[in-house]
Image (cartoon, rainbow, N blue to C red):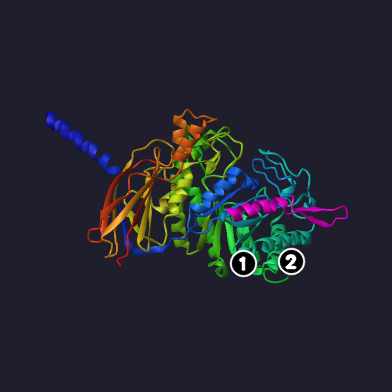
Amino acid sequence: MRWFIFLVMLLFLLPCGAQNQVHVKVDLAEEAGKFAPIYSWFGYDESNYTTTKNGQALLGELHDLSPVPVNVRAHFLLASGDGKPELKWSSTNVYTEDAQGNPVYNWTILDQIFDAYAAAHVRPMVELGFMPKVLSTHPDPYHIPWPTKPGDMEGWSFPPKDYRRWGELVHQVALHMAQRYGSDTVATWYWEVWNEPDISYWHGTEEEYNKLYDYAVAGVREAIPNARVGGPATTGPVADGHSSQFLEAFLRHCANDRSAATGGAIPLDFISFHVKGSPNIVEDRVQMGLNRELDSAATGFAIVRKFPQFQKLPIILSEADPEGCAACSSRTYPHNAYRNGTLYPSYTAAALKGLFELQDRYQVNLISVLTWAFEFENQPYFDGFRTLSTNGIDKPVINFFRMAGMMSGSRVKLESSGSVPLDDILKAGVRQQPDVDALATSADCEAAVMLWNYHDDDVPGSPAEVDLSVKGFPSEAHRVLMQHYRIDDTHSNAYTVWKQMGAPQNPTPEQYAQLQAADGLQLENSPQWIDVNSGAVELNFSLPRQGVSLVRFSWQRPR
């Protein structure tokens, strides 16, 4: 009788175990699409942080994480002020006027910012904004410290009182950059006009933005004839929403109208808009909104598809994030503490694959998924800002980008028994079973598989027991070197170490060194040489909830 009861209990328990077993099958021989380095783009509000000690160090790290150019976008490059940054504020004072109303250009602060980019060997994405005080139609109040109140309107967000002077300002900026860094170099940059003109960053009409765009791109092209210009950097498109209407009207303007500045055709070399998730608090826990970010991308891609002449243009998602406010700390918004740990990188991994799949579905040219996160100066350690590092200590999320930087070549066919289909995510997010999925690439003498165990709810969950099967290795690959990198609570995670120290806000030099030793991308175990049997290898490992793995294979070509 006891044996019978035991067998019944065992049969009852088996389905639960089976639910955690995930089979991931990769075929390196079957291409699924190009692996464009859409991950290698970053941005931030406070352009003056670029020149700080921690800012310059982080720029160097961003350069080093990827074999391809890293692009950096920042706000307030043309704003008036003394160059001292605050949360959501910076300035360069590049443009003023003398007593007679003649333009006066001061390149000191702007040069410091762009010299830091040059020193780090990263490529600026030049956001042309915001309005200098003497050009603003409503200059006062020009700047209101963060956090602002609903209804506050700052002078930098208004149209120019003279569009010709605005166009000449942009022309002089572009000309100065070409002279300082070289015409060939600045021709590789992307020049974007303004930021989110469909909301409070622009207190003008849609027609006035179009005019702003026309004069800006004319100014850039006069200085750099082959410059890459575009916009409109609107907020996340929503079906039949204002942002969607704004984006579509802008594309219609570029397609059908004549330039207000030149009377000729309106240049458009890329299309930019933003996509954001939408977390909520559900029963005292964070519940992410991956479906909103992906749905915004799908809506934007569908709008671009309405214009056949623009379907092959590069699309830059010039802000793509789990939510909207990088400068909102967990002191004010406790749920933002998720940004310190492993939920942020696992979300980003799931979002990356979803955006690749949407690109394939809509047949558009997606070249950028720009993460709006950098670092904040003089703020507490691990304060829940959306950042890549805190006081010079890398957060787990930056290690996701280090993983992505080790993937190259083509995306290849992959199946996962634990994945949540894209249409299900678009409809309802990842709210039932976790999304245990992967993205795989193949290149010359190397291959990589990134895997994640993601769920919208920030609650503990069971690890996934992964059976990874990779086939399609070339016949000359008899043995491959396998490296397994991991982000979880005990790998590539300085936040866990910091909490174990007692969360010190003034770590000792020894503690700081310990945090630095824990903040980089770490191996889950030692590299191993694995025999390839009939062109395939098989691995088994446990992947914790919110964990991200990169399994990388390399081999030598026979001489």
- Tag nearer the camera, 2 or 1: 1
Per the image, the residue denoted by label 2 is 261
Decide which of 205, 542 is in the foreground and name it: 542
Would residue 476 be found to the left or right of residue 343 on screen?
left
Q: Are marks 2 and 1 in contact (CB under 8 Å)?
A: no
Residue at image position (78%, 60%) is 165
Furthest residue toward left: 1
Extent of the magenta region? 93-119
The amino acid beneath tag 1 is Asp
Q: Where residue 81 sits: x, y (%)?
A: 74, 46
Decide which of 197, 215 is in the foreground and name it: 215
Furthest residue toward right: 100
Q: Which quadrant holds residue 117? A: bottom right
The amino acid beneath tag 2 is Ala
Q: Is residue 350 visible?
A: no
Q: Where residue 44 sits: x, y (%)?
A: 60, 48
Q: Where residue 332 sits: x, y (%)?
A: 58, 33
State which quarter of the image contains the C terminus: bottom left
**Against 315, is 10 above or below?**
above
Q: Is residue 480 visible?
A: yes
Residue at image position (25%, 41%) is 15
Q: Label 2 vs label 1: CA separation?
A: 25 Å
User: Is 76 colored magenta in this rendering?
Assistant: no
Q: Secondary structure at mark 1?
A: helix
Q: Which quadrant holds residue 326? A: top right
**Against 86, is 124 above or below?**
below
State which quarter of the image contains the N terminus: top left
Classify 10 Å Cα crowding around label 2: few (below 14), some (14-19), many (20 and above).
some
Q: Secondary structure at mark 2?
A: loop
Per the image, the residue denoted by label 1 is 184
